Amino acid sequence: MLTMQYRIALPADYDMAIIRKRIADRGHLTDELPQLAFKAYLYADRQAPYAAARENRYGPFYLWRDPQGMNDFLGGAGFAGVIASFGRPIVQTWSAWQAETLPDLSIATHATCESVAIPEHAALSTMRDTEHANLRADIDRGAVAAISAFDPTHWTALRFRLWRDIAGLSGENVDIYQVGHISQPKH
């Protein structure tokens, strides 16, 4: 499995209703995308009551079952629409160590995304075990989806979680998003 996210920073005075409408109008278009485990349409609004957002941002997150699905999406009409609206964003990818999700993610209202540096001399297997423990702890805390992954280009570990609510979510280097829509194939 493979994860992917592009983050589009928006001006401080950007009307985030435009992003919410974009998600409402287009979110369903990826509901049955081949090889997609799920896509979370995420946005951060710096005016949101929880005030965790440092900037306005649109940042969809994907979990792919197979790299071919990602390749087809990035070369297809859906991503061409992103480019037409926002320019070509940097697309980050991570190799998934573990992904646990409920069968129906539509109950998710918020997401957290945290990138953690992998120390230079750390054994990758030890880091993977640590991230597995963190994932289990967050599932036990109520995460409806939890993914641990890593990027060997920048030697970082990724902690991505979907949550039912925002209560208790915080962290200095944690990006908190609102969920506008979840695309998840019906099985």
Image (cartoon, grey):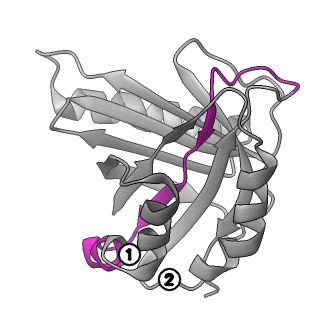
For the N terminus, the image quarter is: bottom left
Give the SS element for disc 1: helix
Name the one closer to the observer, 66 or 146.
66
67 to 128, vertically: above or below:
below
Could you tell which of marks 1 and 2 lies nearer the N-terminus?
Answer: 2
Residue at the spot of label 1:
73
**Disc 2 residue crowd, few under 14, some 14–19, many 20+, Cα 10 Å:** some
How many circles with numbers are drawn on the protein?
2
Q: Position of residue 104 (x, y in %)?
A: 72, 69
Q: Position of residue 70 (x, y in %)?
A: 33, 70
133 to 35, vertically: above or below:
above
The three-letter code of the residue at mark 1 reads: Phe
Q: Position of residue 156 (x, y in %)?
A: 28, 29
Is residue 67 one of those drawn in magenta? yes
Q: Are marks 1 and 2 in contact (CB under 8 Å)?
A: yes
Residue under the point 38% across and 49% down: 89
Residue under the point 24% across and 40% down: 151
Q: Which mark is residue 37?
A: none
Residue under the point 71% across and 63% down: 23
Give the SS element for disc 2: loop
Q: Position of residue 16 (x, y in %)?
A: 76, 44
The three-letter code of the residue at mark 2 reads: Leu
**Disc 1 residue crowd, few under 14, some 14–19, many 20+, Cα 10 Å:** some
Residue span colored magenta: 49-72
- Residue 155 horizontal side relative to residue 162, left or right: left
Question: Which quadrant would residue 45 be assigned to in this image?
Answer: top right
Name the one closer to the observer, 69 or 84.
84
Question: Which quadrant would residue 121 be assigned to in this image?
Answer: top left
- Residue 31 horizontal side relative to residue 148, left or right: right
Is residue 143 one of those drawn in magenta? no
Residue at the spot of label 2:
33
Name the one closer to the observer, 64 or 181.
181
